[in-house]
Image: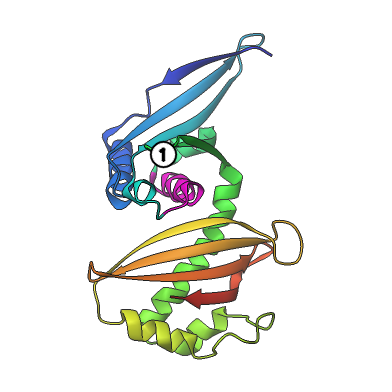
Amino acid sequence: AFLLLIISCDSLTNENMKVADEIVRTLEAEQGELFFMKYIFEDNKEKEYYIQFKLNKSQGIEKGLADPKLLASYCASQLFKEIDKKTIERSFGFEIIINSSIKNETFFFEKKNIKYAWEGLNTQNEYIKLILENNFEKANEILNLEDYPDIDKGISKKIHERIAGKKIESVHFFSDYTNIKENDCWFIILAIKIEDKELLTIKSLVEKSNTDKIIYIEFE
């Protein structure tokens, strides 16, 4: 069917624009643009909606330090979490356009995949929360590292030593990862800025079939 593309502006509320502004601030970008797009199928007048976000000149990209697809994953997951629920319910996905002086790239994330990815992200966030609460027993219950026996069993305490009692700000990224079979895990990266001067990067794997457990973890 022939597609006619127009922009639907009825969801450009102040609250939604604040979400976009916060993403721009977090990713140290020059500018961000948020659109709510509407497909109208001319032959039957059916409508489909998706959310489009353009991120322009993020410092991580400009300095060659960040992967555009990972930055796009953060944008999509934050929009899913923070945009008003009515708009999310009627949208089928997120088109993230990463513009830089190097090149421009476009990524599309289906809403259902972002929803499932958040299950893994929430597990990672709960693990860090328990570490900050000195609850190593419960934090270690989230770890199921039998596939990777070489991982230091005291890793939770070592992470605690780096972040406990300090002002931290975190940003998450995710992508598909093949552990045993194709795309069976979420690869999650948590970048934690400590006291605005030190960066701790925690990388983990969460199985898509069991998002309650972290099966691999490392930090640097």
Above or below 156: residue 63: above
Residue extending furthest toward the top: 43
What residue is pinned by disc 1? Answer: 102
Front residue of 1/104: it is 104
Q: Quadrant of residue 57?
A: top left
Q: Is residue 148 visible?
A: yes
Which amino acid lies under the numbered mark 1 shown in the image of this protein? Ile
Return the x and y of residue 81 as percentages of the image width and height: 43, 49
Q: Quadrant of residue 110?
A: top right
The residue shown at (42%, 53%) is 66
Q: Dot 1, how many residues are within 10 Å of its Cα: few (below 14), some (14-19), or many (20+)?
A: few
Q: Which residues are magenta?
A: 66-82
Point out the image quarter for the C terminus.
bottom left
Q: With 34 as the anchor, is 140 left or right in this view?
A: right
Secondary element type, mark 1: loop
Return the x and y of residue 193 as percentages of the image width and height: 31, 67
Total numbered labels:
1
Point out the image quarter for the N terminus.
top right
Front residue of 32/88: it is 32
* Residue 81 on the magenta span: yes
* Residue 163 on the magenta span: no
Above or below 35: residue 3: above
Above or below 177: residue 134: below
Q: Is residue 135 visible?
A: no
Return the x and y of residue 167 as percentages of the image width and height: 24, 72
Return the x and y of residue 138 as percentages of the image width and height: 49, 85
